[in-house]
Image (cartoon, helix red, strand yellow):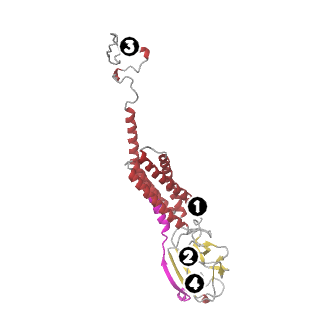
Amino acid sequence: MGSDKMDDSLIFMAYSDSSGKNVTLSPRLSYGHVEPSYTKDITVEVLPGTQIVDGNYTVNAMCKNCRSWKGGSIDPTNTAAKFIYATGPGGNLKSNSLTAGIKRHDLYGAFTMDLTKAFGVKGVPAIQFADATGTVQTQDSSDRDFAPPAHAVLMILAFVGLMPVAVMVLRILNSPKWHGVAQTASALVALIGAGVGIKAGMQYNRTKNFDSAHQIFGIIIIVAMIGQFVLGFLHHRMYKKTQLPTKLAPIHIWLGRVVIPAGIANGFVGFPLALNSKYNWALLACVLLVIVVAGPFAFWRFRRNISKKNALHDEPTGYQAQPWANRSEAQSDISLGQMDYQQQRNHPPIYQESVQGRQFV
């Protein structure tokens, strides 16, 4: 009350208590289009008759020292005092806490009230809704908070979708070009998602200080992702010039092995922070789908690498002291004392040199 917008308004927020049968009434102040904050300066006493029946809330309460507050006031002689209201979204919020976190409303509006008609005997009044001529509705609008779901979709696309694709393109298809394309796309999507997440975090009391585990780990992961991308880019440029491995490659690889699972794990922390824990099941389904799809390719690559190693191991290597000798006739597997020099045929061919009539063998 006190305004036709949220800024500088005194708001009475009602939600289910922990039992689900009664109402928690929290007086809050709003300073902008963000989640209102609980105030101890306003005293509200819940009166008998307050209840929840078939999803309908009935709140009977008496407010003390509510004539003025920081940023606003109300005049009981005003015949057109400004009020706002908001409802939803539906959910499972059940709390006795006056500071419980909430989601953004999905319906809001404004109306005026003739406060000169709000006088009567003390106690809970018997309101005749059919004769409620003291209020006039002036606004009714629907609303939707797109930032949190957009943040979730973009980050899942980056860490569960594009980043694993970038790995598979390089390891299975051996295509550095398309690996770079997928890596760039995933980094851009993740950065956009992080920006949307920052915007969403500024709207809620539980996240506006950016001190939650999800936000702290998220910032660290994004910084590591940027570093991993830069290292990969530098490695690729250096490799194109020298055609030699670089010291940056192992760091790039291991950062990727840390960043991807860390980003996915942080998603499971983020949904409870957004009061949407049920969507952890959807995230788990996406992760399992990627594992099922990528698993056979990873196994095939593992078997292929084993076959290559075995093939290299079977090839003859090393220096042959007598390349003219037949390998089947060599006696390198017996001790020198047992070798039959009379039957040795692994000697170089005889050549002639006319030096004082002697023959050299």
How far apart are the alpha carbons under marks 2 and 3?
A: 109 Å
- The answer to which of marks 1 and 4 sits earlier in the sequence is 4
- Can you say which quadrant of the picture contains the N terminus? bottom right
How far apart are the alpha carbons under marks 2 and 4?
A: 22 Å
- The answer to which of marks 2 and 3 sits earlier in the sequence is 2
Label 4 SS: strand
Amino acid type, residue under disc 2 in the picture: Tyr
Residue 246 makes an appearance in the image: yes
- Identify the residue under disc 1: 212
Q: For the residue carrying disc 1, how many other residues have a C-alpha within 10 Å: few (<14), some (14-19), or many (20+)?
A: some
- The answer to which of marks 3 and 4 sits earlier in the sequence is 4
Q: Residue at x 38, y 45 (%)?
A: 300
- Identify the residue under disc 2: 57
Q: For the residue carrying disc 4, how many other residues have a C-alpha within 10 Å: few (<14), some (14-19), or many (20+)?
A: many
Q: Residue at x 50, y 74 (%)?
A: 106
- Identify the residue under disc 4: 82
- Identify the residue under disc 3: 341
- The answer to which of marks 1 and 2 sits earlier in the sequence is 2
Q: Residue at x 48, y 49 (%)?
A: 252
Q: Is residue 86 magenta?
A: no
Residue 282 makes an appearance in the image: no
**168 sits left or right of 78 in the view:** left
**232 sits left or right of 347 in the view:** right
Pick whichever, 357 or 257, lies toward us.
Answer: 357
Label 3 SS: loop
How far apart are the alpha carbons under marks 1 and 3?
A: 83 Å
Where residue 78 sits in the image (x, y, percent)? Answer: 61, 88
How far apart are the alpha carbons under marks 1 and 2?
A: 32 Å
